[in-house]
């Protein structure tokens, strides 16, 4: 199977500087609403809500692991296929790899790997929140609007499309 042809962004706005933290937050927020809605619906259909009531043991760890796999998988697959998640499509953003083309699957996984912090018992949510804040700070302090997670992925960037 051959890799899809790389597609550079079309008519990017601010290609040198990238998209700011505010619009990127909106895109991520929209994606999380979609993911929570879909997984909640699946949970309701299969009756998972009642199975998890009051359980903080191994079941919650498994549920957290599945959630992390779904979230990282969603972002990685969507970003590596066309550079856009549904939130990025709505906000007219596109993620590009260091070469200016669509990120590879590895780059997309690395850029979203910080979600895996959620698996840490008791403090995972705080670790994720801390990572999100750090990413937002690095995006806002960077002249190119590149966050720590973009650097960790080898130099990805999020651009606004015209």
Image (cartoon, rainbow, N blue to C red):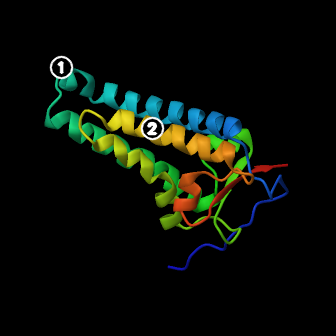
The residue identified by callout 1 is 54
Please tell me in which quadrant of the rendered image residue 42 appears: top left
- Whole-number angstrom distance, CA of label 2 to CA of label 1: 26 Å
Q: Is residue 18 left or right of residue 154?
A: right
* Quadrant in the picture for residue 96: bottom right
Query: Quick one: which residue is furthest to the left in this view?
Result: 57
Q: Secondary structure at mark 2?
A: helix
Q: Nearer the viewer, mark 2 or mark 1?
A: 2
Q: Position of residue 59 (x, y in %)?
A: 17, 35
Residue 157, compared with residue 86, is above or below; it is below
Can you give x and y, in whole percent of width and height, for residue 112 in the image? 48, 52
For the point 65% across and 41% down, which residue is it?
Answer: 24
Residue 23 in the image: x percent, y percent?
A: 70, 37
Residue drawn at 61 percent across, 72 percent down: 4
Left or right position of 40 against 30:
left
Q: Which residue is mark 2?
A: 130
Q: Which mark is residue 12?
A: none
Q: In this rendering, would 76 be left or right of 50?
A: right
Q: Residue furthest front?
A: 141
Image-based side of 156 in relation to 132, left or right: right
Name the one closer to the observer, 5 or 9: 9
Specify few, some or many for label 2: CA neighbours under 10 Å numbering under 14, 14-19, or 20 or more: some
Crowding at label 1, few (<14), some or many (≥20) Cα neighbours within 10 Å? Answer: few
Going from N to C along the chain, the mark reached first, 2 or 1, is: 1
Mark 1 falls on what kind of element?
Answer: loop
Q: Residue at x 51, y 50 (%)?
A: 75
């Amino acid at each position: 199977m051959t890799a899809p042809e790389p597609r550079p962004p079309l008519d990017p706005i601010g290609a040198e500087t990238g998209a700011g933290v505010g619009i990127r937050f909106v895109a991520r927020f929209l994606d999380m609403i979609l993911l929570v809605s879909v997984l909640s619906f699946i949970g309701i259909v299969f009756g998972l809500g009642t199975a998890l009531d009051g359980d903080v043991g191994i079941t919650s760890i498994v549920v957290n692991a599945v959630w992390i796999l779904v979230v990282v998988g969603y972002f990685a697959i969507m970003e590596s296929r066309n550079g856009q998640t549904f939130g990025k499509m709505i906000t007219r953003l596109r993620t590009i790899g260091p070469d200016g083309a669509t990120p590879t699957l590895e780059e997309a996984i690395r850029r979203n790997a910080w979600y895996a912090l959620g698996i840490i018992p008791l403090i995972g949510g705080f670790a994720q929140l801390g990572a999100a804040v750090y990413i937002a700070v690095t995006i806002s302090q960077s002249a190119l609007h590149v966050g720590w997670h973009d650097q960790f992925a080898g130099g990805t960037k999020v651009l606004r499309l015209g």
